[in-house]
Image (cartoon, grey):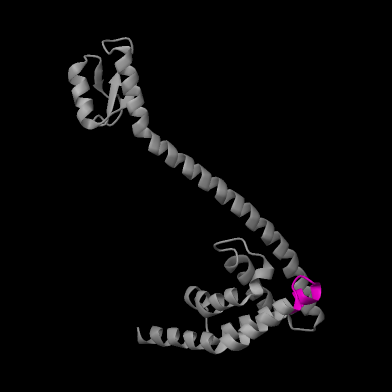
Amino acid sequence: MNLKCDPFEADFLRRAFADVTPGYHMNKTHWNMVIIGGDVPESELRRQIEHSYKLIQPKAKKAKRISKMEENYEELERQANKVREENKVHLSEFEKWLTDKGLSKKTIENHVDNVEFYINMYLLRYQIQDVTDGCFQGNLDVFLGDYFIRKCMWASCAHIKGNAASFKKFYAFMLEKGVIKQSDYDELCESIKLDMPEWLATMKEVEAAELDW
């Protein structure tokens, strides 16, 4: 039987008992092999087993935490996929809504792509948020004023304005559909109006820094 042991005690036990030897196929500094039924008394064997269990218990707890994290990740991914399926329906209906408005195919593609990135990538990056969360000032400000500028290689002042226009159209559609309230849509429009100058200024600073570099 291989048992984990404190290195100093492991050496002492090997000297004290003929049937305690360095661990077989184990780290010989930390593991002993004990022959059951040999010269190690039963009470001493039980003590060594309990000692070994205490040493490996933290790893068992860590494995349990990892397993729990994996379970949590799988549950979050399940919830995220559920939201993505709901978003797929919203985006399909939004595309039809834009078509009925008489917009060009290219313009429609740009609006749908902008919204899809926002609701399927950004809103689900750290936590589960559905489309209704996307019209709130906090999400808009962090996305267009920071995340989009730092993370998206295609970011520019024109793209910030384009995203804002796409979001206004999408949430106007969601308002008509009854998914959000008028107050939610008003908050989105007010945020875009008030925060746009700061978003553009940040974008220009980043562009200037890249040119200097």
Q: Where does residue 34 sit, x and y in percent of width and height? A: 30, 18
* The N terminus sits in image quarter: top left
For image coordinates 27% across by 24% down, the residue present is 32
Is residue 170 shown in magenta? Answer: no
Instruction: Tell me: 143 left or right of 43.
Output: right
Q: Residue furthest right?
A: 100
Characterize the magenta stretch by its predominant secondary structure.
helix
Compared with 89, 198 (above or below) is below
Q: How many callouts does the rendering have?
A: 0
Compared with 45, 62 (above or below) is below
For image coordinates 51% across by 48% down, the residue present is 69
Instruction: Tell me: 170 left or right of 68.
Output: right
Is residue 180 shown in magenta? Answer: yes
Judge by depth and name the residue closer to the eye, 191 or 207.
Answer: 191
For image coordinates 25% across by 29% down, the residue present is 28
For image coordinates 44% across by 39% down, the residue present is 61
Q: Where does residue 146 sit, x and y in percent of width and height? A: 50, 77
Judge by depth and name the residue closer to the eye, 169 or 9.
Answer: 9
Residues rendered magenta in the picture: 173-182
Instruction: Tell me: 29 left or right of 149.
Output: left
Q: Where does residue 175 sit, x and y in percent of width and height? A: 77, 76
Judge by depth and name the residue closer to the eye, 189 or 99.
Answer: 189
Q: Where does residue 191 sit, x and y in percent of width and height? A: 62, 83
* The C terminus sits in image quarter: bottom left
Q: Is residue 170 visible?
A: no
Compared with 31, 108 (above or below) is below
Compared with 137, 2 (above or below) is above
Instruction: Tell me: 18 left or right of 193.
Output: left
